[in-house]
Amino acid sequence: MDKLRITGGRPLNGEVTISGAKNAALPEICAALLTADPVHLNNVPRLRDVATMRLLLDNMGVQTETHGERGGMSFVAPDSLNPEAPYELVKTMRASVLVLGPLLARFGRAKVSLPGGCAIGSRPVDQHIKGLQAMGAEIVVEHGYMVAQLPQGRSRLKGARIATDMVTVTGTENFLMAASLAEGETVLENAAQEPEIPDLAEMLIAMGAKIEGHGTSRIHIQGVDRLHGCTHQVVADRIEAGTFLCAVAATGGDVVLRHGRADHLDAVIDKLRDAGAQIEAGDGFIRVRASGRLKAQSFRTTEYPGFPTDMQAQFMALNCIATGTSKVTETIFENRFMHVNELVRLGAKIQTDGKVAVIEGIDRLQGATVMATDLRASASLVIAGLVAEGETIVDRIYHLDRGYDQMEAKLRGIGADIERIK
Ligand SMILES: CC(=O)N[C@H]1[C@@H](OP(=O)(O)OP(=O)(O)OC[C@H]2O[C@@H](n3ccc(=O)[nH]c3=O)[C@H](O)[C@@H]2O)O[C@H](CO)[C@@H](O)[C@@H]1O
Ligand SMILES: C=C(OP(=O)(O)O)C(=O)O
């Protein structure tokens, strides 16, 4: 199993190119299920989750191809395919649930494994099921699968008003895709506003969908009879960019993130500036400069445009070596402090009580062997390793490979002493 070996203490300097967003590419690959025409995506990141999603579609009978070095992928989903997502693939990637909406909308049936819980929380999909039922789908859960079909005599989902109990990102994406091919109007209340939602909506509009209000909490979708192919550029990964910003803020240095979208990272950038990092941004770049110990920052994760839960672990690593005490409150997932015990193994001083972690900043961390437990926990351990004294081994980095495109190569390119070992 691959590990990362990091020798801490080097500042980071230079340029990094930010890849396309995992959380946009995954739903956008699923959107290719909505048409028989070719769909081309550019800027798709090279990630394990993308490979898994491709396998899932291959398995159904979709023709998938990759093109060149720049993240080009194309898909042709024929009129007849096997609309199933088996447990073996779904269990390795929760985002597989994103095939449910498009399969139901285009083929009138789908059999998708329940994803089950994961390290960061129980993560049920009840809202996805409720919303699609409101659109007329009949869904039963049997033998661990969601078995969904249209009632006899119906060939399309019907538009509905869907008000979810909480803001759900993949739920909103499933409804957007399903509603695009439904009969009549769908209104999504309490819709997620994460930048990946408008990016998906823009792709669907390029395919002929009629969508208004994306990027706000109320989205109107007027269903159409058919969608056509399109070419779409996957939006830059705000979480990858935020992770590099935290890394530079922790190690010190001067780094430009090419293709970084500062406008998608306001909450994180505000906190980094308050901490003492200098951040400038312009069209397609973010520059971060930092030196010495920064000031610890308290924050609370919330839905976009609030502080993203997917940046909580990385910012916590920075707080561990900042001056002062900070309080981090995780409100989205009930078990997203798995990195705390590993950071403590590196010498960090953190106490948790339910949703709250209190971090007492210390002068330095010390290298040790630590174990990655989930994607962003892995990233926080890498940041901690970059500033720790001596050598840190991060084990189980298959989590990191799910969602970061060549992270260690990008870090090496800006001066980190980091290598992948077997
Ligand atoms: C592939 C992808 O885009 N993943 C992101 C997506 O995950 P994902 O879409 O799975 O997360 P949700 O926004 O759905 O989850 C938010 C909260 O709602 C709960 N919930 C959600 C749906 C449901 O049917 N029932 C229910 O109870 C979840 O358990 C969680 O507590 O948004 C999360 C929150 O920003 C991010 O951390 C993930 O990186
Ligand atoms: C939690 C995450 O992803 P997923 O929803 O794919 O598990 C993440 O990207 O941090």
Image: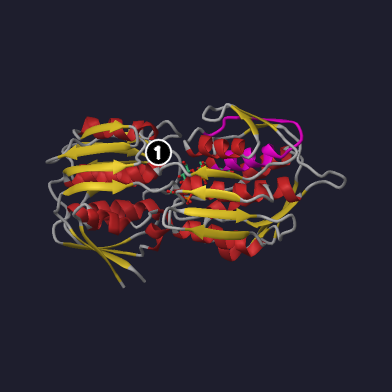
Q: What residue is at 28 percent from the left and 54 percent from the top?
A: 410
Q: Is residue 416 above or below residue 328?
A: below
Is residue 402 toward the left or the right of residue 28 in the image? left
Q: Is residue 374 magenta?
A: no
Residues in magenta, as a range: 170-192
**Percent x, y of residue 390:** 14, 61
Is residue 132 toward the left or the right of residue 283 in the image? right
From the Cβ of disc 1, is ligand 1 less than 8 Å away?
A: yes
Dividing the image into 4 quarters, which one contains the C terminus? bottom left
**Percent x, y of residue 240:** 36, 46
Q: Residue furthest right?
A: 153
Q: Residue furthest front?
A: 68
**Label 1 neighbourhood size at 10 Å, few (<14), some (14-19), many (20+)?**
many
Q: What residue is at 63 percent from the left and 43 percent from the top?
A: 128
Q: Quadrant of residue 249?
A: top left
Residue that badge 1 annotates:
308
Q: What residue is at 32 percent from the left and 52 percent from the top?
A: 379
**Percent x, y of residue 205:** 61, 35
